């Protein structure tokens, strides 16, 4: 049941830009931020943040929600995607200096005895994700500051996720071609 609740909350938070785009016509900005804070609090209390990086991400998001509730304006709602990218950049970059890297931790869930070649590969993939989070965060901040509300919603609610999926697909294709796999 806890897994289902966390999955539903994860999907709802991914839909945040669309919720803001459609919700702003019916409710105040502080109410949208408060709803996001409620979802994040449920996720935090239900054990949805098992590791330090996840807890950091949730705590930063909750602080942001408090800020957005306090300011109660549309511009404060638009910075959530940029903040998430910044925190993910910090988590992934920190893992490069204090191993195991973020991607290595994920890889070890499937391959607990990851060989040194795999560790080197996961380090490179973590570096690629750092670049992605940097560029995506800059794009999210730029759309928050200088684009129309429709463009902000389109980029942060669709295009960013498509780019993330494309990066995952490319990484998977590279991994299949370059790594030894047991059949």
Image (cartoon, rainbow, N blue to C red):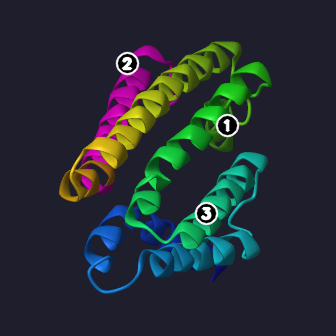
Q: Nearer the viewer, residue 13 or 168?
A: 13
The residue singled out by tag 1 in the image is 91
Q: Quadrant of the N terminus?
A: bottom right
Is the stretch drawn in magenta largely helix, strand or loop? helix
Give percent across and percent down for residue 70. 60, 71
The residue singled out by tag 2 in the image is 177
- Indicate whether residue 119 is drawn in magenta: no
> In this image, 182 relative to 174: left or right?
right
* Label 3 secondary element: helix
- Separation of residues labelled 2 and 3 (CA atoms): 46 Å
Give percent across and percent down for residue 145. 35, 44
Give residue 67's mark: 3
In the depicted structure, whether residue 100 falls above or below residue 53: above
Nearest to viewer (mark 1 / mark 3): 3
Marks 1 and 2, the one that precedes in the sequence? 1
- Indicate whether residue 165 is drawn in magenta: yes
Marks 1 and 3, the one that precedes in the sequence? 3
Q: Are marks 1 and 2 in contact (CB under 8 Å)?
A: no
> In this image, 25 relative to 183: left or right?
left
Marks 2 and 3, the one that precedes in the sequence? 3
| Residues in magenta, as a range | 157-183
Q: Is residue 6 visible?
A: no
> In this image, 27 relative to 33: left or right?
left
Q: Residue at x 30, y 38 (%)?
A: 163
Nearest to viewer (mark 1 / mark 2): 1
* Label 2 secondary element: helix
* Label 1 secondary element: helix
């Amino acid at each position: 049941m806890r897994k289902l609740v966390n999955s539903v909350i994860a999907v709802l938070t991914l839909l945040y830009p669309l919720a803001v785009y459609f919700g702003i016509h019916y409710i105040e900005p502080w109410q949208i931020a408060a709803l996001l804070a409620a979802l994040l609090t449920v996720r935090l209390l239900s054990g949805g943040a098992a590791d330090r990086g996840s807890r950091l991400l949730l705590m930063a998001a909750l602080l942001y929600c408090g800020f957005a509730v306090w300011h109660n304006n549309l511009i404060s709602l638009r910075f959530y995607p940029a903040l998430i990218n910044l925190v993910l950049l910090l988590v992934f970059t920190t893992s490069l200096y204090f191993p195991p890297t973020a991607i290595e931790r994920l890889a070890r869930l499937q391959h607990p005895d990851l060989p040194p070649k795999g560790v080197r590969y996961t380090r490179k993939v973590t570096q690629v994700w750092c670049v992605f989070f940097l560029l995506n965060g800059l794009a999210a901040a730029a759309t928050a500051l200088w684009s129309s509300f429709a463009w902000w919603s389109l980029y942060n609610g669709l295009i960013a996720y498509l780019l993330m999926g494309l990066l995952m697909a490319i990484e998977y294709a590279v991994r299949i071609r370059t790594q030894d796999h047991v059949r």
